[in-house]
Structure formats: C-alpha cells, structure tokens
Image (cartoon, rainbow, N blue to C red):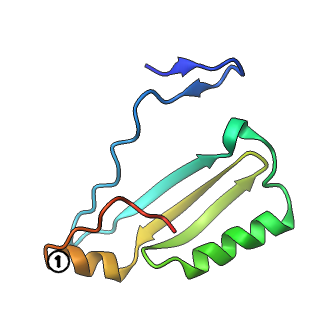
C-alpha cells in the first residue's frame, strides 16, 4: 500500500522490482519519471533538448515515443543489442541503467 504525501500524491513504499529481460523476445518498457515534488521545471526547450541528447548518447537503452509534461515524463524504451549480447553470454547487465 502506498503512503499518501502531504501533497495528496502517493509515495511508493518499496522500489519497483526492476525489468526482467527475456532473451528472444521484444523487451519493451513503459517508464514514467516524476520530478522531485513534481516541480514543473520540464516545460521548456532546454530540458527537452537535454533529455533528447541524453537519450541519443545512451548505450544501454533505445528511447522511442515519449510524453514530456511539466512535472514528469513517460517514455517507451527497449534494450539495445549490447544488453542482449551480454545476457546471451551469461554476463550480468547489472541494475537497469537507463542512461
């Protein structure tokens, strides 16, 4: 059960269990990230361009469609080939590192 915050929003009690990558399947993840206290600082072109640049330079995941809002963003991503290759050889990919 999530605990309500003073703002009326809920806070997760336990972290998400993570992404379970399945070999030979499309591993697609839908992820939503909120700014701290849902402060509306993402509603500008600078933040948008920095996010796009970070996603372009990312080595572990490819970012697809996304929705950028003032206090959060939601995006679809999938593992790049290097992650799949590590798993095929029995090597860990560690914690899910989005960027």
Residue found at x 81% / y 50%: 41
The front one of 68 and 3 is: 3
Against 68, residue 77 (above or below) is below
Percent across and percent down for residue 95 are 34, 59
Q: What is the tally of numbered marks visible in this picture?
A: 1
Q: Is residue 4 above or below residue 88?
A: above
Q: Quadrant of the N terminus?
A: top left
**Residue sitting nearer the eye, 79 or 64:** 79
Name which quarter of the figure residue 10 lies in: top right
Q: Residue at x 55, y 27 (%)?
A: 11
Q: Secondary structure at mark 1?
A: helix
Where residue 40 sits in the image (x, y, percent)?
81, 45
Residue 62 image offset from top left, x and y in percent: 49, 74
What residue sits right under mark 1 in the picture?
A: 88
Give me the residue at 77% from left, 41% from top: 39
**Where does residue 87 sit, x and y in percent of width and height?**
21, 73
What residue appears at the point 72 percent right and 22 percent down from the top-left corner?
Answer: 7
Which sits in the foreground, 59 or 19?
59
């Amino acid at each position: 059960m999530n605990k309500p915050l003073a703002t009326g929003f809920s806070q997760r009690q336990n972290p998400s269990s993570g992404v379970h990558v399945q070999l030979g399947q499309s591993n697609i993840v839908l992820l939503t990230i909120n700014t701290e206290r849902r402060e509306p600082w993402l509603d500008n072109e600078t933040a948008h361009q920095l996010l796009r640049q970070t996603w372009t330079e990312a080595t572990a995941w490819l970012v697809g469609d996304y929705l950028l809002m003032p206090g959060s963003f939601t995006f679809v991503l999938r593992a790049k080939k290097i992650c799949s290759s590590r798993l095929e050889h029995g090597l860990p990919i560690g914690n899910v590192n989005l960027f």
